[in-house]
Image (cartoon, helix red, strand yellow):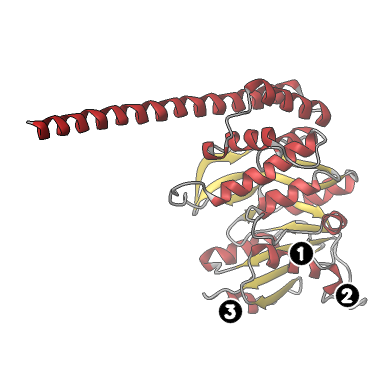
Amino acid sequence: MSLDWNKSQVSSDKISVPTVSVVMSVRNGGSDLPRAVACILDQTYRDFEFIIINNGSSDGSAVFLSAISDPRVRVYHQDDQGLAAALNRGISLARGHYIARQDHDDLALPDRIMKQARFLDEHQDHGLVGTCAEIWVGDQPTGRFHDHPSDDADLRFCLLFNNPFVHSSVMIRRSVLVQSGGYTTDPARQPPEDYELWSRIARCCRVANLPERLTIYREVPGSMSRAGIDPFKQKLVTISSENIAYAVGEAEPAEVHRDIAAIIHGIPDMVTGRTTPAMMEQILSAAGRRIGVGEGTLRDWSRRLMHHYYSHAHAARHFWSAVRSARSVLRTVRNSLVGTGRR
């Protein structure tokens, strides 16, 4: 992939190697940035370095970052290269055994790093651990939460369809990132660069979420609606269909895998209409058996898929009914005009 581990700028053997490297990319962090930095520097866990990539900010972020005097913080300035490339650079500079992500507009509770480092210390077969999160809008709690599954099998099954990890909550073994190649910078596959990376990581090791809400995720207000197919959702369907195919032992997605992904993500324009409910149920069952997911999780996703499927079919029926009605009205108007012309 895009991560070149041979270009690390860290070369001094005299510098003590921290256990954790926290990596943040900043582009116009604004008023959120000081709190995001402070929440890491105030962690109860102390054995870490904090690598911050100023990714082409045009506000006061560069001045603020350059003024930080804490010796654990290492700041690098560069032109905007996109989030994935900036994170890859930060990871390549990291010396820690574990890489923790932090976004410039989210917050970490004081014991987040300590609890995640302890988890990875105690679970050597796990390569990635996230946390649950509170959802805020600005500085206001919403009473909503990202309470994703914590168990490896449930998470790997969720990854077939969507992203069950809060990006700014994850901690990953550096060795796993080396093996996986880091974030993709292929425009056809990102964003969502996080979902794409977690999908590859989950194929080589176990993953988990801590059930505690140790992250405050600031929700960005919904973007404007688009006409036609949303390019972001198209990429979600691409990654999801690859995950479904992999889960049932196929090297490449087939029509049924792409249809399942398109239905789950609400993109009827990408559904072929040639995949039956029985075919989709068979794929889900096969994936569930191979992953080892519980019957409850399998039933939940099956119900969700069928709900989307029949909603899509219902909408399609109404669409064609409306088309037929419109044609009938046009014929009536046309005949009326013709009749008027004859008189």
Q: Which residue is mark 1?
A: 2
Residue at 82% x, 54% y is 180
Q: Residues within 10 Å of mark 3 (few under 14, many from 20)?
A: few
Residue at 71% x, 40% y is 159
Identify residue type, mark 2: Ile
Q: CA distance from mark 1 to mark 2?
A: 27 Å
**Are the residues tagged 3 and 1 within 8 Å (C-beta)?**
no
**Are the residues tagged 3 and 2 within 8 Å (C-beta)?**
no
Residue at 63% x, 66% y is 82
Q: Which residue is mark 3?
A: 63
Tell me which label, 1 or 2, sits earlier in the chain.
1
- For the question of whether residue 41 can be seen, the reply is no
- On the image, which quarter does residue 153 sit in? top right
Q: Name the residue at the right extreme.
A: 13
Q: Quadrant of the N terminus?
A: bottom right
Q: Residue 343 placed where, x, y %?
A: 6, 31
Question: Residue 232, relative to residue 146: is it above or below?
Answer: below
- For the question of whether residue 314 can be seen, the reply is yes
Q: Residue 21 placed where, x, y %?
A: 79, 63
Q: Residue 307 placed where, x, y %?
A: 55, 25
- On the image, which quarter does residue 205 sit in? top right
Q: Is residue 268 left or right of residue 335?
A: right
Q: Is residue 66 left or right of residue 143?
A: right
Mark 3 secondary-structure assignment: helix
Q: Which residue is mark 2?
A: 15
In the foreground, 316 or 176: 316
Q: Residue 17 placed where, x, y %?
A: 88, 68
